Amino acid sequence: MRGHPRAGAARIIAVIFHLHREQFVPGDPAAIWEFFATPRNLDLLTSPHLRFRIVGDVAPRMYAGQIIEYRVGILPGVWTRWLTEITHVREGEYFVDEQRAG
């Protein structure tokens, strides 16, 4: 295929994964929502072995369109950047975060 414009071009294959999780947490719904809707608490919700850390300042409450940057320790001494966007918030019920990088 010599001379063909795509000859030797690398193929890029995009793979999109969707992870949906629901969890029942017993307790006062307003207090539970307050905890989950506070971005700084994401550190507490993530397994300690990931060494998950929010980078920079974040708003005290989640809102649609919010971008949150993290650093995650994937191996000892190896960190990766992780960027998410809060795309939907239904106050008192749920939020959706979509990974943008990492």
Image (spheres, grey):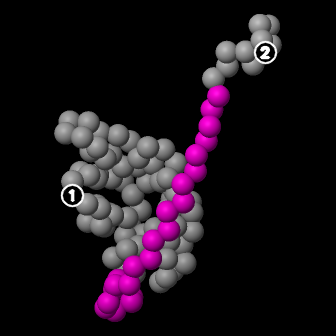
Residue 99 point in image, percent of width and height: 49, 53
Q: Which of disc 2 and disc 1 is earlier in sequence?
A: 2
Q: Is residue 56 visible?
A: no
Foreground pick, 50 / 82 = 50
Residue 88 point in image, percent of width and height: 57, 68
Q: Contact, CB < 8 Å: mark 1 with mark 2?
A: no
Question: Is 4 positioned to the left or the right of 75 in the image?
Answer: right
Q: Is residue 69 visible?
A: yes
Please give the name of the residue rendered at 33% of the width and 53% of the height, measured from the top-left corner. Answer: 54
Is residue 71 positioned above or below 60 on the image?
Answer: above
Neighbour class for label 1 at 10 Å: few (<14), some, many (≥20)? few
Foreground pick, 73 / 83 = 73
Give the residue number, with chain letter if any, for mark 1. 48
Residue 6 point in image, percent of width and height: 75, 19
Please give the name of the residue rendered at 41% of the width and 46% of the height, measured from the top-left corner. Answer: 82
The answer for how far apart the CA atoms under marks 1 and 2 are is 49 Å
Q: Secondary structure at mark 2?
A: loop
Look at label 2 and name its amino acid.
Pro
**Residue numbers of the magenta segment:** 11-32
Is residue 97 positioned above or below 30 on the image?
Answer: above
Foreground pick, 39 / 13 = 13
Q: Nearer the viewer, mark 1 or mark 2?
A: 2
Q: Is residue 20 magenta?
A: yes
Please give the name of the residue rendered at 61% of the width and 41% of the height, measured from the top-left corner. Answer: 14
- Is the C terminus in the top left, top right, bottom left or bottom right quadrant? top left
Look at label 1 and name its amino acid.
Pro
What predominant SS class does the magenta segment belong to? loop
Q: Secondary structure at mark 1?
A: helix
Q: Which mark is residue 5?
A: 2
Is residue 46 positioned above or below 25 on the image?
Answer: above
Please give the name of the residue rendered at 33% of the width and 64% of the height, measured from the top-left corner. Answer: 42
- Is the N terminus in the top left, top right, bottom left or bottom right quadrant? top right
